[in-house]
Image: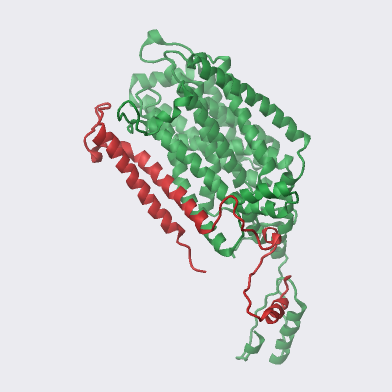
Amino acid sequence: MHYESPIREPLILEDKTLHDITEDIARPVEGKANKWWWALFLFSLVAFAWGAGCLAYTAGTGVGVWGLNKTVGWAWDITNFVWWVGIGHAGTLISAVLLLFRQKWRLSINRSAEAMTIFAVVQAGLFPIFHMGRPWLAYWVLPLPNTYGSLWVNFNSPLLWDVFAISTYLTVSLVFWYMGLIPDFAMIRDRAVKPLTKKIYSILSFGWSGRAKHWQRFEELSLVLAGLATPLVLSVHTIVSMDFATSVIPGWHTTIFPPYFVAGAIFSGFAMVQTLLLVMRKVVYMEAYITIKHIEYMNIVIMVTGSIVGVAYITELFIAWYSGVEFEQYAFLNRATGPYWWAYWAMMTCNVFSPQFMWSKRLRTSIAFTFFISIVVNIGMWFERFVIIVTSLHRDYLPSSWTMFSPTFVDIGIFIGTIGFFFVLFLLYARTFPVIAQAELKTIVKSSSTQSKKLVMSKKIIYGIYDDDDVILQAVKDIREKEFISMKYILHFQFMVLIMHWA
Amino acid sequence: MKPTRLAITSFIYGCIGLSLALLMMWYMMIEDWPMIIGGKPNFSLLQNLPAFIPVTFEMTVFFAAHLMVLTYLIRCKLYPGSNQKSPDPRTTDDMFLMEIESHGNDKEIVDLLKNRSGRS
């Protein structure tokens, strides 16, 4: 077994046994929803319905109902797309990258973080599809033979790379998530009392029987999928950033974009994980599993990635000045002091300044403060995308076409609708799925729970010294028969004794 | 227990995905309907390769991941509606279980097992 220092803080609190973990994780699925859940669910459902109405209006009337104009041809839609894709990144980071680094603290949060990834990517996908104007023809982005002769899609275009990246990312995240869910669905199946529930979870668990051979394959599968998902998650936001970086718009045409976008994505994703988990651990009583330590670790990630994003902002500014290109210089001057100065400074305050509070141990272990910062970071990262997209476009090369962008009620409605849809999916998930990867979590009970720590901390060495070899061997025999917990002994002799018959 | 060869299959699937991606883009962009886009070379796969790397990578991952998952499901006979189940529901809770094949020597095996601290 892997050695863990007793000083390291436990990841499972309250002396939970294996059976307690089963009970705690099955409870939200087996029990009834409380008032809070219903209130949040209905609220989200209303937001979702409004968004669905706005989407239907867009599809029926045309993209003209959005606030776009000739100069600003991309605004809230692409901002929201990049925002949602970025949020998705934390889930894969937690489940894949932290698995490769053998970080045990990923175990209580990976399931929900991956669920968040999938639900966020679903929201992201809606925006480009509806921006096409005729969403029912969305399959035209696929390389299919068509009736206009063999006119293929353009593989030189980053927008097409994005189609491949997002669809690979969504489907691979989905199967990665589902493969981990199978043993946990089996746990709920084995506990189910009602025939219908048993039937549903039997189907969902694919007939999992928990054989050692299956677990061995499962371990290998998880490891290889993690190895594939790690470069995949980095490639996705890299390609998203190339949508901008390969163009010739000042403010977009920079080589810093890929790493800067990836850091920003992880930053915003962890903020969203915090927002969701801080609420979830209360509502479904997971405080013993999602501990202050988990929250602190995630805050440290937010602090580090937030600082990387800050360095990227400053580098961008410096390079704009240093490049000597007046268009580039003006784009950045316009960002900071132009008509959208408030968006730029909102971004700077939320993303660069606010995560620096996390240097303080007291603040990063405070739940209320963490929740506040997570919301601030979510807002800040939305503004980052808005600043990059709209302020770079609204004053283009031709001053006569300079304009401002203002969203219509449809733009706002669709955005709020995706937030509603996201929460509808997440709330349904929290009531029907095992929200913690319990089968995997049980593997760390012996090394990282409170009782395991107590056992190690209470360790004392007792010496028994005797003047006869037969007496000491008799003492060993007596101790063995008593069956003390964690009984280990080392014998020291002054000459060789035949003790083979003891073993 | 013999080590599983699942990772090797994934590597093979990845190679298939990589080849298919290159073959597809060569056929569509170079062979069947070459287009001049921004003056980029359109007559050789090698010269156009930099633009094809992202899609090649994505398809490699796509094939390696999905076909490996399918192989895993098939090898473990896991599918919706499968009638396999846990031999004892407690195995998914807090118990470990060992299946032993017996050939008329049941009593001996049971006696041997009873001598442990766990339950049987």
Relative depth, front residue between A407 and A404: A407
* Residue sitting at x 54%, y 27%: A382
Q: Residue furthest left?
A: B43
- Residue B119 vs A136, above or below: the answer is below
- Spot occupied by residue A134 in the image (x, y as percentages of width and height): 46, 22
| A113 sits left or right of A326 in the view | right
* Residue sitting at x 57%, y 24%: A415
Q: Is residue A266 visible?
A: yes
| A406 sits left or right of A399 in the view | right
Query: Which quadrant, please, contains the N terminus of chain A?
Result: bottom right
Relative depth, front residue between B96 and A105: B96
- Spot occupied by residue A370 in the image (x, y as percentages of width and height): 65, 37
* Colour chain A is painted in: green
* Residue sitting at x 60%, y 49%: A181
Q: Which chain is red?
A: B
Relative depth, front residue between A309 and A97: A97
- Residue A382 vs A7, above or below: the answer is above
Q: Is residue A499 visible?
A: no
- Spot occupied by residue A27 in the image (x, y as percentages of width and height): 74, 47
Tally the numbered discs.
0
| A315 sits left or right of B118 in the view | left
* Residue sitting at x 48%, y 40%: A169
Query: Which quadrant, please, contains the C terminus of chain A?
Result: bottom right
Q: Residue furthest top?
A: A400
Q: How is the image coloured?
A: by chain
Residue A118, picture quadrant: top right
Relative depth, front residue between A492 and A433: A433
- Spot occupied by residue B34 in the image (x, y as percentages of width and height): 25, 31
